[in-house]
Image (cartoon, grey):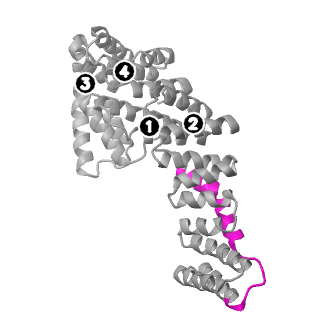
Amino acid sequence: MYRTATALTRILAPVMAAVLFTALPANAAVSSAVGKALNQAASAARSGNNGAAINAIKSAEAAASTAEEKTKTAQMAGYVYTRAGRYSDAANALASTGASPRQIAPLYYQAGQYDRAISEARKAGGEDMQILIAQAQTRMGRPGEAVKAYQALIRANGAKPLYLENLAGAQYKTGDKKGYLATTTQLIKVDSSPARWNTLLTAFRQNQMRPEAKLALYHLMGATGTLSKAEDYQEFAKLALVANQAGIAASALAKSGGGNSDAMSQKLGQAAAGMNAKAASEAPKLAAAPATAVRGGNAYLGLGQYPQAIAAFDKAIAANGNDSDQAKVYKGIAALRAGNVPLGKASFAAVSDKNGMKDIANLWGLYASSRGAIKA
């Protein structure tokens, strides 16, 4: 869900490099047969000929008779197997030489032997090994243990964005929505850049959600500058048209970068233009009745008439029907577009857990707290 894998690779790269470096045997008194095989193994491994390197290791193993020869052969085996991507064999070879847990843990992790990786990492200690433990727990489908691991990292090393990001992901997987929101809020306060929002919203959009919630998500992606693909703008436009936000659909298509060069864009553009032409006359009629007030508010939202949109949404909210939570979310969006941040925050906070709009309302509340009004 989040970027831990990439970050883990970056953080553990020096550890893996140390494995390769220390596995190369130093000059030692070994027989000519063992020495020749080890030199062949090193040369073949450096040139990427893994098959020849492994064959040379087997020759060295067969020829080794003294304790020193066996140790140097095992060290070279660790090097060769690591270069070949046979991480379990590398770990086992180095373990036989008494290599440190810090060398062995990342090899077991790379091999997918997460329990053994965790065991060795705990012996080693340190921030990088704590990260390995946390990610290994995630890979094993133990988000609750991953939560504990990231919380320990934060206590020991501070609330770094990387830790908060992955803690939030683990909390979401455990169903701890309250903890997820608290961590996400802390994360955005630490870093509210478009890149951070993009990570958050890209992960969030993987969840199943009702169309009205997904449309609100696209509104939020637009507000945070995280919409970039033409197909995303098209999807935004489709959802906006269904919701009667014709002006929003037209604006999304105009920003898509694809123009009207394809059939779908042309079709959506025509639909948006036709609906938008009628919006000014139809919005008051729709807003007058509680049953259609949400569509009226959406029409006003598309027209950029935010006070009228808020009034229409208020009528739907007062009716307390199935679409009242939807109305609260879009009232909040209209309020932020109008520059009324306190009203927006209050509207998002009032959304209930009943109709599938609470999670996106929480994210909008986070936006209102960290960024305030929506800038055109």
Residue at 62% from the left image edge and 79% from the top image edge: 46
The disc at residue 173 is 1
Q: Is residue 247 magenta?
A: no
Which one is in front, 300 or 152? 152
Point out the tag, 1 or 4, that comes first from the N-terminus.
1
Q: Looking at the picture, which amino acid does disc 3 mark?
A: Ala
Marks 4 and 3 sit apart, C-alpha to C-alpha, by 31 Å
Point out the tag, 4 or 3, that comes first from the N-terminus.
3
Q: Looking at the picture, which amino acid does disc 1 mark?
A: Lys
Q: Is residue 159 something that shows in the picture?
A: no
Which one is in front, 52 or 234? 52
Marks 3 and 1 sit apart, C-alpha to C-alpha, by 42 Å
Residue 327, placed above or below residue 248: above
The residue at which mark 4 appears reads as 353
- Local SS, label 2: helix
Marks 1 and 4 sit apart, C-alpha to C-alpha, by 18 Å
Horizontal and vertical percent for residue 353? 36, 21
The residue at which mark 2 appears reads as 148
Q: Which of labels 2 and 1 is toward the front?
A: 2
Q: Classify residue 359 by image quadrant.
A: top left
Horizontal and vertical percent for residue 273? 25, 35
Q: Residues within 10 Å of mark 2 (few under 14, many from 20)?
A: some
- Local SS, label 1: helix
Q: Which of labels 3 and 1 is toward the front?
A: 1
Point out the tag, 3 or 1, that comes first from the N-terminus.
1
Left/right placement of residue 111 relative to residue 289 reads right
The residue at which mark 3 appears reads as 279
Q: Which of labels 1 and 4 is toward the front?
A: 1
Tell me where the magenta segment starts and ends, as one range: 5-33
